Image (spheres, rainbow, N blue to C red):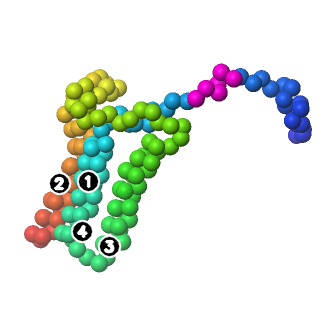
Amino acid sequence: MSKHLTRELVAGAAEVRTELLQPVTVDRSFELPRGLYVATAAAYLGFLAVLATGLSSPGLVIPLSICAFFIAMAVGVPAIWTRLKPDNRVAAMSWARFRRQGIMTHTGRLSSGEAAAQMLVLPILIFAWGIVCVTIAAVV
């Protein structure tokens, strides 16, 4: 069934490999400038702000607050994750370098404009959708 293994028995059978004890370098930079992530969060929070002002109702305070909390956590948790140990020696790409080099994706290299368009198209469409919804609610 089960057998109690003493420390001496395990130490005699164990193989210690010291080459695996080297410091680990971790890249947690997400490779894009922080401004793109800020713009994404701003578009999502802007959508909530449009809904809160256009459809102002006391019943929407709690649901919109919960949504704002989740958006803040969706941006905040990765920001904290980039600062965890082991030390992340790779910094986020600067905006000038991003404009100059673009970024390499799985499907090939993208210029900065193409990468920004891919990243921001959904948040901007959602923001526009909020404006359209509030406009329709105001007209009807």
Q: Are marks 4 and 1 in contact (CB under 8 Å)?
A: no
Q: Is residue 22 magenta?
A: yes
Q: Which residues are magenta?
A: 18-23
Point out residue 79 in the picture as x, y percentages from the top left corner.
Answer: 41, 47
Residue displayed at 37% across by 56% down:
72
Left or right of residue 20: residue 10: right
Residue position marked by numbered label 2 in the rendering = 128
Give the class, few, some or many, for how many residues have Cα within 10 Å of label 3's Cα (few <14, many ≥20).
few
Residue type indicated by callout 4: Ala
Q: Which mark is residue 61?
A: 3
Provide the secondary structure element on which disc 4 rests: helix
Measured as percent of width and height from the top left, residue 114 is found at 21, 32
> Which residue appears at 61% of the width and 26% of the height?
22
Type of amino acid under label 3? Val
User: For the residue labelled by badge 1, is the local secondary structure a helix, a strand or a loop?
Assistant: helix
Q: Identify the amino acid type marked 2.
A: Ala
Location of residue 24 (image quadrant): top right
| Residue behind mark 1 | 42
Residue 76 in the magenta stretch? The answer is no
Q: Earlier in the sequence, mark 4 or mark 3?
A: 4
Residue at point 20%, 59% (across, down): 130
- Percent x, y of residue 89: 45, 33
Between marks 2 and 1 in the image, the one whose residue lies nearer the viewer: 1
Q: Position of residue 106 (x, y in %)?
A: 35, 26
Observer-nearest residue: 16 or 72?
16
Q: Is label 3 or label 1 in front?
A: 1
Closer to the N terminus: mark 2 or mark 3?
3
The N terminus: image quadrant: top right
Q: Is residue 55 above or below residue 133?
A: below
Displayed quadrant of residue 64: bottom left
